[in-house]
Amino acid sequence: MSIKILAVAAGLIVSTVVSAASLQTVVNVLAIPDGHKLSPNASWDAVAKIPGIKWRDTEPTPRARDYIRSGAMQLKGLGGTSITWSGLPDAAIGADLRTAVRVSPDKYADMLKAQLPAVTRLRLVQGPCNNDPIARHSAVYEVAIPDRRPLFVRINTRPGDNNGNTTIQVSPDRESSWMC
């Protein structure tokens, strides 16, 4: 999706095209091809070249158990989004996105379908966890793309997190902390 922005500067009209990325961009980077241990698209050099991300960090920085690199991007239908990639010293293996909008839990699947190609299969793995006050606004989906190992996506719109806006986490593994 492209948005045309017109600006008037010194009597001239300047036209700039700003493209919004989709969650598909993140999935394409992290999805591991069958027979591989890591995605060849997830090297930190490749992540640095993703169009549309304004980086806060100049390179991945070590954290307690992993490396991270943070930035901001426009995400189709979800507005300004903060993104933190996490991973190993040489490659990203996960992403945490904090959107500028609130998505209702009953719209999670629709939001994913709008963000991903039609060939993607979605399967609800968990959620919402009605017996857990923290996880009752969360859902975990398995995202399957042809010729790739499935990824797991956790979506959360918890009133106390991210100013009540939606958080999306993407990982090749179903994280144990995502359980009810």
Image (cartoon, rainbow, N blue to C red):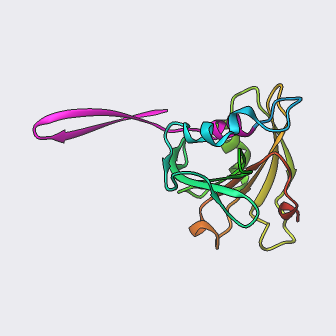
Tell me where residue 144 sits by quadrant. top right
> Is 95 on the left-hand or right-hand side of 4?
right
The answer to which of 112 and 107 lies nearer the viewer is: 112
The answer to which of 172 and 115 lies nearer the viewer is: 172
Residue at figure coordinates x 49%, y 32% from the top left: 1
Give coordinates of residue 86: x percent, y percent.
69, 53
Tell me where residue 162 sits by quadrant. bottom right
> Is 48 on the left-hand or right-hand side of 119?
left
Residue found farthest to the left: 11
Q: Quadrant of the C terminus?
A: bottom right
* Residue 99 covered by magenta stretch: no
* Residue 12 covered by magenta stretch: yes
> Is 116 on the left-hand or right-hand side of 48?
right
Q: State whether residue 82 appears in this view.
A: no
Total marks drawn? Answer: 0
Give coordinates of residue 72: x percent, y percent.
51, 52
Instruction: Please say if 5 is above or below 125.
Output: above
Residue at figure coordinates x 83%, y 25% from the top left: 147
Give coordinates of residue 103: x percent, y percent.
63, 55
Instruction: Please say if 170 is above or below 18.
Output: below
Residue at figure coordinates x 81%, y 45% from the top left: 172
Give coordinates of residue 110: x percent, y percent.
69, 42
Q: State whether residue 17 appears in this view.
A: yes
The answer to which of 53 and 109 lies nearer the viewer is: 53
Residue at figure coordinates x 73%, y 59% from the top left: 66
The answer to which of 90 and 80 lies nearer the viewer is: 90
- Tell me where the magenta segment starts and ends, as one range: 1-30
